[in-house]
């Protein structure tokens, strides 16, 4: 049986596309939701034939209003969504929307968490001078890029790298691991880590 997946994105949507075209096992990306009317992901959704919708996120910049989280949750539950994948959603989810999908909401982040959470993780890693960078898919727990890790992959940092060349290498790796993490979750192989919060 198919598992209905919703992808929530604010930006270009390349990870959304990777989830639509990748092997997620029984998963099927049914809907793209965005908090940004100008998100490139909306155009990609039209090209890929995936239903998409902009929903008002509320008056705050980095999180949703509580009422808006309720409305987003109602929308997703009403459509029978079983798994929510954040793919470049630049807002924290920590209220009714998270409650509705606890353990069924995951996020991708362009660093080897717990290193470099937050904005411009690739730039943070580059400036720090790490020799190995990477990306992480994890369950969402209401923090900023925190929560039990499902999958991580590393990429090398070369002498010749700039922030953008490193970010591009990480992004390619992100596209590989997100669908793998979803598949692992759906097959019961994404075991919660030992982190106790
Ligand atoms: C990706 O690099 C994703 O990991 C990052 O935003 C980018 C979205 O790109 N997310 C975060 O930084 C979350 N903290 P995309 O729109 O092309 O998928």
Image (cartoon, helix red, strand yellow):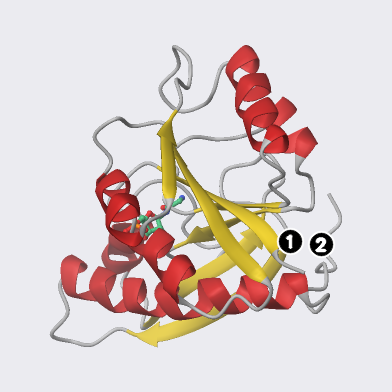
Residue 133 visible in the shown view:
no
Give how far across and how far down residue 23 sits, in percent.
Answer: 55, 80
Q: Residue at x 52, y 26 (%)?
A: 63
In space, the residues marked 1 and 2 are separated at their CA atoms by 7 Å
User: For the N terminus, which image quadrant?
Assistant: bottom right
Q: Is residue 149 left or right of residue 32?
A: right
Q: Residue at x 73, y 61 (%)?
A: 148
Q: Is residue 53 left or right of residue 41?
A: right
Q: Residue at x 33, y 32 (%)?
A: 36
Q: Residue at x 54, y 68 (%)?
A: 136
Q: Nearer the viewer, mark 1 or mark 2?
A: 1
Question: Mark 2 = which residue?
Answer: 195
Is residue 19 positioned above or below 10 on the image? Answer: below
Q: Quadrant of ligand 1?
A: bottom left
Give how far across and how far down residue 180 sits, in percent.
Answer: 59, 79
Query: Mark 1 or 2 closer to N-term?
Result: 1
Give how far across and how far down residue 164 sits, in percent.
Answer: 18, 67
Give how far across and how far down residue 145 sits, in percent.
Answer: 57, 51
Q: Is residue 172 left or right of residue 29?
A: left
Question: Mark 1 = which residue?
Answer: 148
Is residue 189 positioned above or below 61 on the image? Answer: below
Q: Is residue 189 left or right of residue 51?
A: right
Q: Secondary structure at mark 2?
A: loop
Residue in front for this viewpoint, 91 or 118: 91
Residues under numbered marks 1 and 2 in contact, where contact means CB atoms less than 8 Å apart: yes
């Amino acid at each position: 049986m198919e598992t209905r997946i919703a992808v929530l994105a604010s930006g270009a949507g390349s990870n959304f596309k990777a989830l639509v075209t990748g092997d997620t096992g029984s998963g099927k990306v049914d809907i793209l939701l965005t908090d940004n009317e100008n998100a490139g992901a909306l155009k990609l959704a039209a090209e890929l034939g995936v239903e998409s919708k902009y929903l008002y996120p509320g008056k705050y910049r980095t999180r949703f209003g509580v009422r808006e989280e309720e409305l987003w949750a109602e929308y997703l539950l009403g459509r029978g969504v079983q798994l929510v994948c954040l793919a470049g959603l630049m807002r924290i989810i920590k209220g009714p929307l998270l409650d509705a999908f606890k353990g069924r909401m995951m996020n991708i982040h362009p660093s080897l968490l717990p290193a470099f959470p937050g904005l411009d993780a690739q730039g943070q890693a580059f400036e720090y001078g790490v020799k190995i960078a990477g990306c992480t898919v994890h369950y969402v727990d209401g923090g900023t890029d925190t929560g039990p890790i499902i999958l991580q992959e590393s990429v090398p940092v070369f002498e010749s790298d700039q922030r953008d060349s490193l970010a591009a290498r990480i992004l390619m790796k992100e596209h590989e691991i997100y669908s793998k993490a979803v598949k692992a979750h759906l097959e019961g192989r994404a075991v919660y880590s030992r982190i106790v919060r």
